[in-house]
Image: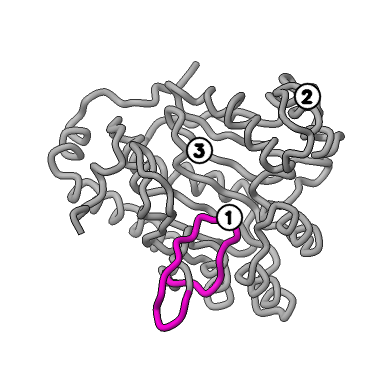
Amino acid sequence: MTTPATPPATAEHTIALTDPIRYTSDLLRKIRNYLHDNGFVEVVTPVFRQADDLTGKRATAVLGAGGFLRSMIGPALRYNLQYAPRIFEIGPCFRPERPDATHSREFTMLDLYAANEDFAFLYELAEDLIALAYPKPLPHISVAEHLNRDFGVDLTRHSPQNLADAIARRLALPATTPMHELIDTAIATHIEPLTRGTAAFLVDYPLGGNEPCARRRDGTTAIIDRFEVFIDGLEVAHGYRDETDHDAFIERATTAGLYNREQALVLDAITAGDLPTRSVGLGIGIERLCMAATGIDEIRTFQQSRCF
């Protein structure tokens, strides 16, 4: 049975349309209260960053010296696990991309990290937080099972390269296409559309995609502990268990062009014993969660003072 993605018109929907500032404020208050009640400490990390994230998604900026506006909160938040075992931040991120109904150059993210917790803890945490706005069941859809069905590659025993080769053949893409691009294309075209008209956790992601931070699952050759939450085809959250094999992480991040100074600073702190090795991380797009929860398909509804 599928989960209806867009709730019927309700008082909440009406409030979101007529008073989006109040709707967003109420949701942020609920999120903060939940996290504080569960032992999380709110921190603030720099919006202006010294390093590019190497994806081309960071907007350049000048503040005394050249730098970048953060495209994600990410490693700078994890670095603060040395001060508290559960931390979160809610703040702006920036990406120099063309605005449309679901994308904005500036948007609000909730990011959090928890030390010495397992993947089951993260699933429950994500479900609880999303339920503050969208209180409906979120069934699981296995990415690995669908890739096996569509491309004939079993990620419990085959390699990421086997998957990339099968995708290139099936989708008639150049064999020279980077592995992470092939995998991301297959997921975007074959699996993410399954969430249209419903809501679900996408789980059992393949190794070799665009998330090098996630740990490879024990007993598999190419499945990582990562999930994404989609509501009516719209990604609203992602989570993962951090990779504990530092050499494997560096290799994967470098191959995907995602290993930068920020990642190196975190690994240096772990090596020095300042940061816990085991942690889980979660990110939720606030405006997108508001959109999905209310059935309003325009991100600008939940952004204020756009004229500035």
Q: How far apart are marks 3 and 2 (CA)?
A: 29 Å
Tag 3 or tag 1, which sits nearer the N-term? Answer: 1
Q: Is residue 66 something that shows in the picture? A: yes
Q: Residue at x 50, y 49 (%)?
A: 125
Give the vertical position of 257 relative to 84 (above or below).
above
Judging from the image, what secondary structure is the residue with disc 1 in? loop
Give the vertical position of 84 relative to 213 (above or below).
below
Question: 10 Å neighbourhood of mark 1: few (<14), some, or many (≥20)?
Answer: few
Q: Is 108 in front, or is 261? A: 261
Numbered mark located on residue 169 in the image: 2
Residue numbers of the magenta segment: 48-66
Residue 193 x %, y %? 52, 24
Q: How far apart are marks 1 and 3 (CA)?
A: 22 Å
Give the vertical position of 140 relative to 115 (above or below).
above
The answer to the question of whether label 1 and label 3 lie on touching residues, with beta carbons closer than 8 A, is no
Residue 297 x %, y %? 31, 32
On the picture, is 306 further left or further right than 122? left
Residue 120 x %, y %? 61, 46
Choose mark 3 or mark 2, whichever is in front. 2
